[in-house]
Amino acid sequence: MEKTKDKRTVGICYTLAGGMCWGLSGCFGQYLFQEKGITAEWLVTVRLVLAGILLILLGLLLTKKKMGDVWKESADKKRLLIFAIGGMLTCQYTYFAAIQHSNAGTATVLQSLAPVIILGIVCMKEKRLPRKLETGAIFCALFGVFLLSTHGDIHSMSITILALLFGLGAAASAAAYNLLSGDLLRKYGVYAVVGYAMFIAGLAMVIFVRPWRYAVVYDMETILATAGVVVIGTAVAFSLYLKGVSLVGPFMGSLLGMVEPITAVIVSLVFLGAAFQMMDLAGFVLILGTVVALSLRSK
């Protein structure tokens, strides 16, 4: 019994640490946008390529020959390519673009609306109306977005239209990310699917963005913050989170993962000068509360 409790405690710590690393990743991105004049296009391209290589190397180290299995079946190869562009690329770009036009906290909370979008897709697929709890969750989520974007005044916007559109786009693409990747992840594992998808998406971005043309100042702060996005926000976050989920289970892992937006809000407020009003915080609580309620409902 004591060993089980210790194992659960260690799992909780790992999972929380992984979620916090994801939250910090967005804050490193916000720092690069605010202080170094870097664009979302440049950062996403660099992150996808380098993080993809890093995850592939980790997969080769940890799973060895299994990394090549995803390329053996033509149907799975096509699905991986679709996931790389339709899930990974769009998810990463809209998220960091939302940060660039607002802040890490706001963008991460808006991206957390993904389960609400998935719920809508499930209801359409099952040809049914949302149940009472689901209807309440949808209403709370929409009201949270309303407070966050207007502060309760329908005649004005408290965040820019681009910030709102990219934030909602991040939620929609995160939903697509989860729906497109589910079977592949169960069959081939995270390192193979996410690693290859990141690298493929990064190569696609390289063709259009051409990051070497950007006038980036490669000083120590830029290098460290970029490393934070790539290493802490990818390799470290995935490794800690997956280890934690293996100990506490996927349901508890999904709830503990809510530390990601909370971390992003706190860090962007305390260290990056983001200004949140009471209406913003009320919107955050409504949106995050909705996600927790849906997680409990779908246990």
Image (tube, grey):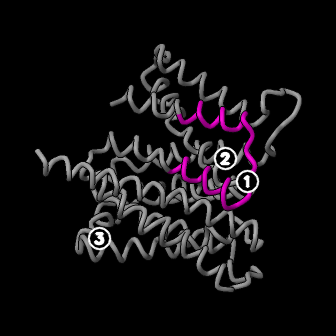
Q: Amino acid at mark 2?
A: Thr
* Above/below status of 162 relative to 29: above
**Residue 33: horizontal and vertical position, in percent?**
73, 66
Relative placement, left or right, of 253 versus 64 is right
Q: Nearer the viewer, residue 23 or 75?
A: 23
For residue 68, the mark is: 3
The amino acid pointed to by label 1 is Ala
In the visual, does 51 lie left or right of 192? right
- Image side of residue 140 versus residue 52, left or right: right
**Mark 1 and mark 3: span between their CA atoms?**
44 Å
Pair 1/3: label in front: 1
Vertically, is 55 above or below 150? below
Which residue has dot 1 on it?
A: 274
Amino acid identity at mark 3 = Gly
User: Does residue 268 show up?
Assistant: yes
Q: Which residue is mark 2?
A: 106
Q: Earlier in the sequence, mark 2 or mark 1?
A: 2
Residue at the image point whose x is 58% and y is 43% from the top? 171
**Does residue 109 lie above or below 204 as drawn?**
above
Image coords of residue 156 (percent x, y):
87, 33
Please say if the residues under marks 2 and 1 sit with CB atoms less than 8 Å apart.
yes
**Residue 70, position as x, y percentages in the image:** 31, 63
Real-space Cα distance between discs 2 and 3? 38 Å
